[in-house]
Image: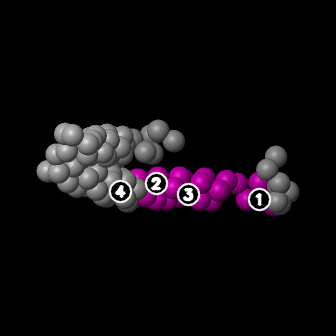
Amino acid sequence: IRPYLYSDGRKKVFYLAMGCMLLSKGLALTAPYCLKIGVNALVPGAINYNLAIMSVAGFGLCRAFSSIFHELRMSLVVKIMREAIQEISLQIFRHLHHLDLTFHKTSTKNTIF
């Protein structure tokens, strides 16, 4: 499957999809730490409302951009997979049509081997 997913024309899209995956996962891992900072900023005696608000906003942005990059990655991967499946199907179709007519007449139907 590698030649179909990682051919010359698809390398840029493949690397872009992998970059989106890394960004998505990185932001998903960062989001809880933003929330942790916001909660710790509300400790009695050392309350910092600005830090708490910014941390909660950062949490929301991390979650939102994580979802955005995930959807972008999926849209890129779907394009690569569709083209790969189409290419494989075309090769199988051509192979079956190049087989000898006697093969088609003598082969049993609905069996793999």
Q: Where is residue 37 in the image (x, y as percent from the top left)?
A: 26, 41
Residue at horizontal 35 percent and vertical 43 percent from the top: 32
Give the amino acid type for the residue marked by disc 1 in the picture: His
- CA–CA distance in space, label 4 to label 1: 50 Å
Q: What element carries label 3?
A: helix
Query: From what the image shows, is residue 27 above or below residue 70?
Result: above
Q: Residue 67 carries which label?
A: 4
Q: Which mark is residue 81?
A: 2
Residue at horizontal 30 percent and vertical 45 percent from the top: 39
Query: Circle 3: is it few (<14), some (14-19), or many (20+) Cα within 10 Å?
Result: few
Q: What element carries label 2?
A: helix
Query: Circle 4: is it few (<14), some (14-19), or many (20+) Cα within 10 Å?
Result: some
- From the image, give the main secondary structure of the stretch colored magenta: helix
Of 68 and 29, which appears nearest the observer?
29
Mark with earlier residue (2, 1): 2
Q: Position of residue 77 (x, y in %)?
A: 41, 53
Mark with earlier residue (1, 3): 3
- CA–CA distance in space, label 4 to label 2: 21 Å
- CA–CA distance in space, label 1 to label 3: 19 Å
In the image, the segment drawn in magenta is 77-106
